[in-house]
Amino acid sequence: DAKTTQPTSMDCAEGRAANLPCNHSTISGNEYVYWYRQIHSQGPQYIIHGLKNNETNEMASLIITEDRKSSTLILPHATLRDTAVYYCIVRVPYSSASKIIFGSGTRLSIRP
Amino acid sequence: GAVVSQHPSRVICKSGTSVKIECRSLDFQATTMFWYRQFPKQSLMLMATSNEGSKATYEQGVEKDKFLINHASLTLSTLTVTSAHPEDSSFYICSPRTLQYNEQFFGPGTRLTVL
């Protein structure tokens, strides 16, 4: 699975949009971009994933660049409960050989 | 759907004892189970992968005789930390994968503290 690079930490004001970047310049054609988050002392929580088109769900939006070498996770109206470590992962989801390997992630702090 | 439970949620034990952690997929069948551990302020590290009815495959640096994994059914997997020592204190997270949903899910984690 391709490696990703994320900023170590970010902060955002409550109510504003949080934009979390991720670089994945070695992504392969069949790899998807996945985002998870981990709130303190809990298991990881799935947020969103995409292949090449932008995606949106009730939690977030995912913007993938046309060359697929980077992406941005957008939390449109951040709340204090969004304080967590956010992990960007690229993987082939339907492969029996695929397993999720976590990088360092971005520690997002939402300030009141 | 895709509910995963772990038991216990936290456990404190004395050095030298063994601790068993259970992971259950409550509403789906887990053909593959991944076990991760996480030390404070670090990311999750994959420990091992097991397929139902088969022996687990361990990542480099993980002692298979110390971390015993049993995946006897499609809804239950266990991780036993044998002869635990303080350096085994960590947050252990199971992650079942199902072909039904073609996805990998995560349990809530078990906090192990070895005194």
Image (cartoon, coloured by chain):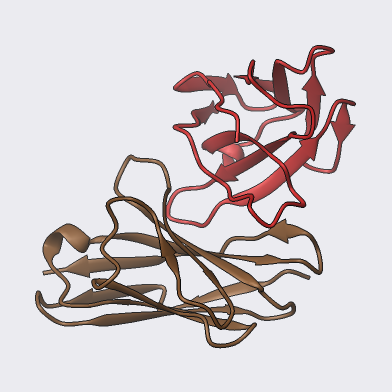
Counting every numbered tag in the picture gives 0
In the figure, the shade used to draw chain A is red
Q: Is residue B26 left or right of residue B111?
A: right
The one of B58 and A35 positioned closer to us in this rendering: B58
Q: Quadrant of the C terminus of chain B?
A: bottom left
> In the picture shown, does residue A81 fall above or below B36?
above
The one of A16 and B40 positioned closer to us in this rendering: B40
Q: Residue at x 22, y 77 (%)?
A: B82
The one of A101 and A105 positioned closer to us in this rendering: A101
Q: Residue at x 44, y 22 (%)?
A: A8
> In the picture shown, does residue A53 fall above or below A25?
below
Percent x, y of residue A28: 72, 27
Kindly indicate the quadrant of the structure image that contains residue B110. Answer: bottom left
Q: Quadrant of the N terminus of chain B?
A: bottom right
Q: Is residue A100 left or right of residue A95?
A: left
> In the picture shown, does residue A99 fall above or below B69?
above
> In the picture shown, does residue A88 fall above or below B18?
above
In the figure, the shade used to draw chain B is brown
